[in-house]
Image (tube, grey):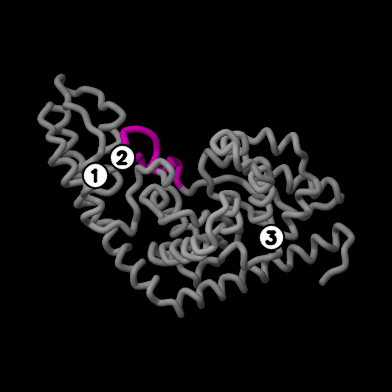
Amino acid sequence: METVVSGIRPTGNLHLGNYFGAVKSFLQMQNEYNCFFFIADWHSLTTHPHPDNIVSGVRKILAEYLACGIDPEKATIYVQSDVREVLELYLYLNMNAYLGELERTTSFKEKARKQPENVNAGLLTYPTLMASDIIIHKAAKVPVGKDQEQNMEMARKFARRFNTFYGVDYFPEPASFSLSNKAVKVPGLDGSGKMGKSEGNAIYLIDDEKTIKKKVMKAVTDSGPTVPNSEKPEAIGNLFTMMEIVSSQDTYNYFNEKYATCEIRYGDLKKQLAEDINMFCSPIRERIQDIASNTEYMDKVARLGAEKARESASKTIQEVRRIIGFKPY
């Protein structure tokens, strides 16, 4: 069975974009692959979070992963910092990573531009830590978005470089993939772009009914179409895309027809959309609250996940040490 690895930074609650863009695919993957899903708390250190926020952020994501249906009996769910072997491999990969190639990565240049006062070594070597997360389990496939494709190419390069430098065929080159032919891009509510935490345009799985309605009712619209069968502007198209994702086909068709005939009432569309989003989020929200309150269960899942992840990582690091020329532990 092929191994799949995917991680998420604990920088806040999961939103609809996270669910339909990634987590929904994870639910299918866990039945077909040997899956390692980790919470990337070491990666979050590049932004210098408060220690309390790291702990709470990790537990939020863990509870939400479980509430969404990721099954610890089928997939290994773990916290990155519980697997110290990753840092050792990170060190080895950094010894064969070069300043120029790291400085040229789009993610580094973009983050350096956004936070010029905090251009730290962690940002620079983000691709090598990401590569370590992946190849420590000898992953064959990694589900990623287009924004991570360059970092995936770096991971393949580092795996290939290790093999070439030491004259072995040890690490596979991990491939980027998505289970669906068409990745689901959930739009934000601000009229443009995809839903995201930093953009402030997200609906979170934990949001209650009142919060969801308030956010949806504030979504950007226009004065409405004046010519039948008009093309939808981006902001309006985003609302219909959201409706296509969470509402029934009949509901979508009804409002689409109203738009085509210039009879659309955006207030009615938003009310219906808010109801449908709440209907989708409600059972997940309840499970999040139940799981988050069960500290014993959460600790057990994290502990068992760490044990399984370390078993896999330890096998790799022992072999890597032998290849490099170090004594095994």
In magenta, the rendered stretch is: 180-195
Name of the residue lying farthest toward the left: 263
Q: Which mark is residue 151?
A: none
Q: Are marks 2 and 3 in contact (CB under 8 Å)?
A: no
Q: Residue 278 location, x and y as percent?
A: 24, 55
For residue 317, side relative to residue 323 (left or right): left
The label number, if any, that marks residue 86 in the structure image: 3
Q: Position of residue 17 (x, y in %)?
A: 39, 47
Question: Mark 1 is on which residue type?
Answer: Val
- The residue under label 1 is 216
Residue 18 at x, y percent in the picture: 42, 50
Q: Earlier in the sequence, mark 2 or mark 1?
A: 2
* Residue situated in front as seen by the camera: 140 or 274: 274
- The residue positioned 43% from the left and 63% from the top of the image is 60
Q: Quadrant of the N terminus?
A: bottom right
Q: Is residue 128 visible?
A: yes
Disc 2 marks which residue? 189
Q: Which amino acid type is marked by label 3?
A: Val
Considering every residue shown, the one lying at the far bottom of the view is: 296
Q: Is residue 185 above or below residue 281?
A: above
